[in-house]
Amino acid sequence: MFKWILVAVGVVLIGGFVFWQRNSVKTSYVNGLSQYNKLPGREFIFECDCYLFKLASHPTDYPLIGTHETVSELPAAVQDKLVGSALPGVRLLDTVRTGTRFKIVSVRRDESRTKTNVTFEILLLGETERKYPRLDAFFLLDHSLESTGAAPQVREAYAVARVR
């Protein structure tokens, strides 16, 4: 009887390890690669209001930022009164308004068995009291350039480069 319990525990452990390996994501910072090395430190200014949010289906280290145009679960209009709401598939954490400045602090590549995503980690500037100053800009980016080996770009509908 004890032998069968040990076998069952072993099978569960092996199954759990295999499941974990199949669903794990390897994260690497690629700031030094040629197509990414000029990105950290670049500053931008938001051209539209956005939500800070977390997706229920996809855990991330930092809150995401975007609008309804790129994340259909988000409300069409950005409203402060919705902050704190848990909508189907998304939890709204905060808003970012037009004119807010940010800079790219790091370029990250997340690799799983099924896909590879490149994203920018950004830092909101000039607002020291923000609860979430560092964000994941995945939904602000135009990822179509990645198929050619180039770095993704910030969509101009969301933000423009700050010229100093």
Image: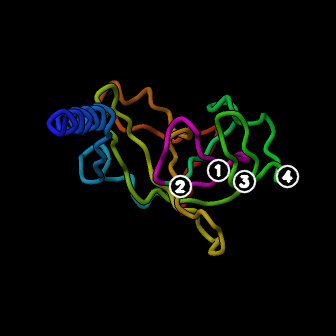
CA distance for labels 2 and 4: 21 Å
Quadrant of image for the N terminus: top left
Decide which of tag 3 and tag 1 comes sooner along the chain. Answer: 1
Q: Residue tagged by mark 2?
A: 135
Q: Which mark is residue 35?
A: none
Q: Which residues are magenta?
A: 43-61
Q: Which mark is residue 95?
A: 3
Q: Tell me: residue 114, above or below residue 88.
A: above
CA distance for labels 2 and 3: 12 Å
Q: Residue tagged by mark 4?
A: 81
Amino acid at circle 4:
Lys
Label 4 vs label 3, nearer the camera: 4
Amino acid at circle 3:
Thr
Quadrant of image for the C terminus: bottom right
The extreme right residue here reads 81
Q: Position of residue 31 (x, y in %)?
A: 30, 53
